[in-house]
Amino acid sequence: MEFERAVLALRAAGCVFAEDEAQLLVEATSTGRTIDRNALEALIARRVSGVPLEHILGWAEFAGVRVLVDEGVFVPRRRTEFLACRGAELAREHKHPVVLDLCCGSGAIALAVRESRGRSPWAVEIYAADIDPRAVATARRNLPHPAVVVCGDLFEPLPRTLRGRVDVLVCNTPYVPTDAIGSMPPEARLFEATHALDGGDDGLDVQRRVAAECRAWLAPGGHVLVEASEQQAPRSVELFERAGLRSRIEYSDDHDTSIVISTNPR
C-alpha cells in the first residue's frame, strides 16, 4: 500500500521513473518489513518539491559503484560513466598508475577507476581536487586514505611532487554555457552548485585552463580525459593540441556523450 501511494505521488509530480524511485524511498525508510510512514512521507515531499533523489538518499549509483553524495554536491551523471570507463581502461595499462581527478565533485570518477582495479588501496595512487569545500568533504568520504583529496582551484592545491607523474587525468569540468544554465532541469540548477555547471560563455573556460596547465603534471605518455558536448568536442581538441598534446574525440552511443582524450608525447 505504501509503495503504491508513493508511486502515485511521484508520478503526479512528473517523476519519469516513479516506480524505481518509490522502491528506493520505501527501502530507505524500512526496517525489516516495517515502514516508517512519517519518514516516507517526508522523503516523498522532498522529492516532489524537486530535491534530487540522490541528495535525499545520500548516494548515487555510478559505474556499478555506490557513491556517497551530500546535499548541494554535483550528482554524477550516467553519461560520465563513459569517461570513467575509458579512464579505467587507460589506468589498467600501468602496473601502479597515478590517477588525478580534477573538478572531482563527490570523487565518483576516481572511485570508479579505483574499484575497476580491485579493492586493494595500493592498486592505484589516487589524487583528487575540487574548489568546493562541500564536494571535497564528500570526496574524502568516498576516497579515504591513502587517496589524497585537496580543496582548491584546479592544480593549485596539489603537492608539487605530483608534477610530471600523472598517468591518467580525468576531469569532468563544468561545460554548460552560462546562457544555458537557466534552461537546465530544476534538479540541477536549484540544488547543485552553479560553479559545478557553468563553463562560461562557450562552456569551455575551465577546459582552457586545464589544457594550459596539464602537460606539466602529466607523465610522458600520460592522458587527460574531459567530457564535452558534440558541438564543443572539436574545439576541446584544438585547446589540448595547442598545448602540445595529441587529441582525439570518442563517442559512446550507449551513454550519448562525447569525450576528448589527449595524450602527452613521450
Image (tube, helix red, strand yellow):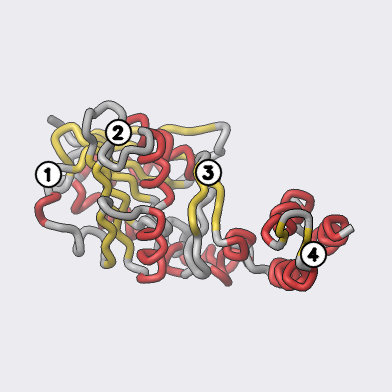
Residues marked 1 and 2 touching at CB (< 8 Å) = no
Marks 1 and 4, the one that precedes in the sequence: 4
Question: Is 170 displayed left or right of 51 in the figure?
Answer: left
**Picture disc at residue 91:** 2
Residues marked 3 and 1 touching at CB (< 8 Å) = no
Q: Residue at x 50, y 65 (%)?
A: 70
Residue 249: give x, y in percent of width and height. Answer: 39, 34
Tell me the element at label 3: helix
Label 4: which residue?
13
**Picture disc at residue 79:** 3
Marks 2 and 4, the one that precedes in the sequence: 4
Q: Can residue 123 be seen in this view?
A: yes
Residue 130: give x, y in percent of width and height. Answer: 33, 62
Q: Distance between the residues labelled 1 and 2?
A: 16 Å
Q: Is residue 73 above or below residue 61?
A: below
Tell me the element at label 1: loop
Give the quadrant of the C terminus.
top left
Q: What residue type is labelled 3?
A: Arg
Question: Is 130 displayed left or right of 8 in the figure?
Answer: left
Q: Residue at x 55, y 56 (%)?
A: 59
